[in-house]
Amino acid sequence: MPALPPKTTRRNEQHRCAHCGSRFEVWHAADPLEAYVTVDVRCPCCHAQTPVSLPRSAEKDLRVENLPGMEPETGVVD
């Protein structure tokens, strides 16, 4: 019986659109210990190009999803 390939764990990182301010998640399966590069992704709300920092191999395998709802409570007051 052949060995099964290792299961890939997808990671998600939260970002904010530089144009409209909406929150979104970028999902990828890249190793977080890789060197990070700046990648332009499209905001799922306004479709503007937004630069985000991701592990190098995430460029080949990423998914961008909107984060609906209220801002999470952080306890930080602006």
Image (spheres, grey):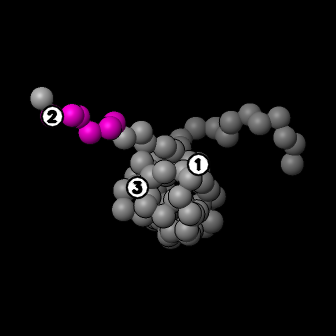
Say left or right for 72 vs 55.
Answer: right
Residue 65 appears in view: no
- Range covered by the magenta-colored residues: 2-7
Q: Amino acid at mark 2?
A: Pro
- Tell which tag, 3 or 1, sits nearer the viewer: 3
Task: Give the image location of residue 77, x and y in percent.
Answer: 87, 42
Q: Which residue is mark 3?
A: 62
Look at 42% across and 39% down and name the residue there. 9
- SS at circle 2: loop
**First reached walking from the N terminus: tag 3 or tag 1:** 1
Look at 60% across and 67% down and name the residue there. 19
Q: Residues within 10 Å of mark 3 (few under 14, many from 20)?
A: some
Q: What whole-number distance in Å separates the C-alpha atoms at marks 3 and 1? A: 13 Å
Q: What whole-number distance in Å separates the C-alpha atoms at marks 2 and 1? A: 37 Å
Q: Amino acid at mark 3?
A: Leu
Contact? badges 2 and 1 (CB < 8 Å)? no
Q: What whole-number distance in Å separates the C-alpha atoms at marks 2 and 3? A: 29 Å
Q: Which residue is mark 1?
A: 14
Q: Is residue 63 above or below residue 49?
A: above
Magenta segment includes 71 = no
Look at 50% across and 69% down and name the residue there. 40
Q: Magenta stretch: dominant SS?
A: loop
Quadrant of residue 21 in the image? bottom right
Q: Is residue 44 above or below residue 71?
A: below
- Tell which tag, 2 or 3, sits nearer the viewer: 2
**First reached walking from the N terminus: tag 2 or tag 3:** 2
Say left or right for 59 vs 74.
Answer: left
Residue extending farthest to the right is 77
Q: Amino acid at mark 1?
A: Gln
Q: Which residue is mark 2?
A: 2
